[in-house]
Image: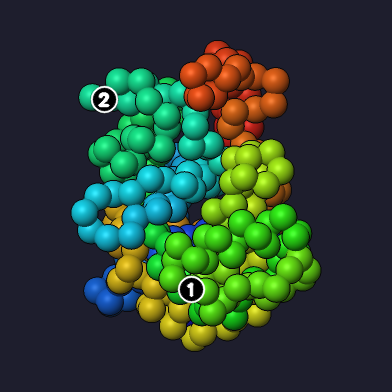
């Protein structure tokens, strides 16, 4: 009964949360968690959120790591925030070229935090620079993200001629020339193509539009997942989870999953930092007006 309730989401809001967590490997219940007693499961469901607060923040990280020699750069940095008090679900992208004072490393672009110290250092950097508590993280690389897209049957995306050229260049670097697109148009992108699309940075307004592409692909993924039943979704996450790094505990996972049916009607919002008009460009870094940025960010996520 618990599993049926967990996966019975009602609308786009539910699918968004599931897609975000599933794409980053965080909705599968570990085997021993499934063996918890009904009493324990019911108790877990009483919690407001896994952290016991009204707002729960998860950092979703997409790394360009190609081997185990280093962490890679964090091309995707999205904070998914669940506000149980205001019934709001938010996606906030943090751009890679943001000015960041990284604990232990000094001032660099934000994506250096993950390259230098991994997810924990990136979490700490966001917490310190934006006074934003991060409760958990999940990380995928190119290969894992491509698997996610393939497992949901691809993502339908409108690709411009300019985007197609850059996408094909990325496919070359990924040794996926067989997946070239002939030109602009509407396509159901496979995993490699979708990853290449999410990486496009030099078409339009550079990284500003890349963060939007990332959120667009995530949106199509959760729309596809609305069509999956409990068995199909369980199989999906079981295939993905072994390839995903995350720090969520089994007990907290149960707490979060138990809340999913109540999140179906949450208001959805998305944004990007730096905010328009609240930053300057200095030495190839985007320097936010930190006072105003923090004020706006906290108002968006916490209603403060």
Secondary structure state at the residue bearing disc 1: loop
| Residue 164: image location, x then y, percent | 68, 62
Q: For the view shown, which residue lies furthest in the bottom direction?
A: 231
Q: Is residue 116 left or right of residue 151?
A: left
x 65%, y 60%: residue:
165
| Residue 169: image location, x then y, percent | 55, 60
Give the residue pinned by disc 1. 176
Q: Which of the two labelled residues, at mark 2 and mark 1, occupies the earlier sequence position?
A: 2
Name the quarter where the C terminus is drawn. Answer: top right
Nearest to the eye among marks 2 and 1: give it: 1
Near-viewer residue (25 or 177): 177
Circle 1 crowding by C-alpha within 10 Å: few under 14, some 14–19, many from 20: some
Q: Is residue 221 left or right of residue 139?
A: right
Q: Quadrant of residue 8?
A: bottom right
Secondary structure state at the residue bearing disc 2: loop
Give the residue pinned by disc 2. 105
Circle 2 crowding by C-alpha within 10 Å: few under 14, some 14–19, many from 20: few
x 49%, y 19%: residue:
283
Near-viewer residue (85 or 303): 303
Above or below, comparing residue 23 to residue 266 in the picture: below
């Amino acid at each position: 009964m618990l599993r049926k309730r967990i996966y019975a989401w009602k609308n786009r809001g539910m699918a968004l949360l599931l897609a975000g967590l599933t794409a980053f490997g965080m909705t599968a219940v570990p085997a021993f968690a499934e063996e918890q007693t009904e009493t324990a499961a019911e108790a877990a469901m009483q919690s407001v959120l896994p952290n016991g607060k009204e707002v729960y923040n998860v950092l979703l990280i997409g790394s360009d790591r190609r081997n185990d020699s280093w962490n890679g750069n964090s091309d995707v940095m999205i904070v998914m925030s669940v506000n149980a008090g205001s019934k709001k679900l938010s996606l906030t992208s943090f751009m890679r070229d943001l000015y960041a004072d990284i604990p232990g490393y000094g001032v660099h672009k934000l994506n250096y935090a993950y390259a230098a110290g991994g997810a924990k250092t990136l979490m700490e950097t966001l917490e310190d620079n934006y006074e934003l508590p991060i409760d958990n993280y999940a990380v995928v690389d190119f290969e894992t993200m491509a698997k996610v897209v393939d497992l949901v049957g691809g993502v339908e995306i409108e690709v411009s001629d300019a985007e197609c050229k850059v996408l094909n260049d990325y496919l070359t670097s990924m040794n996926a020339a067989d997946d070239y697109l002939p030109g602009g148009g509407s396509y159901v992108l496979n995993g490699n193509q979708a990853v290449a699309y999410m990486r496009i940075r030099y078409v339009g307004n550079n990284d500003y539009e890349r963060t939007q592409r990332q959120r667009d692909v995530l949106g199509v993924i959760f729309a596809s997942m609305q069509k999956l039943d409990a068995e199909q979704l369980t199989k999906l996450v079981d295939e993905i989870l072994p390839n995903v790094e995350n720090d969520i505990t089994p007990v907290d996972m149960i707490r979060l999953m138990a809340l999913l049916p109540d999140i179906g009607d949450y208001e959805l919002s998305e944004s990007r930092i730096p905010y328009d008009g609240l930053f300057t460009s200095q030495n190839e870094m985007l320097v936010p007006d930190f006072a105003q940025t923090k004020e706006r960010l906290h108002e968006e996520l916490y209603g403060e």
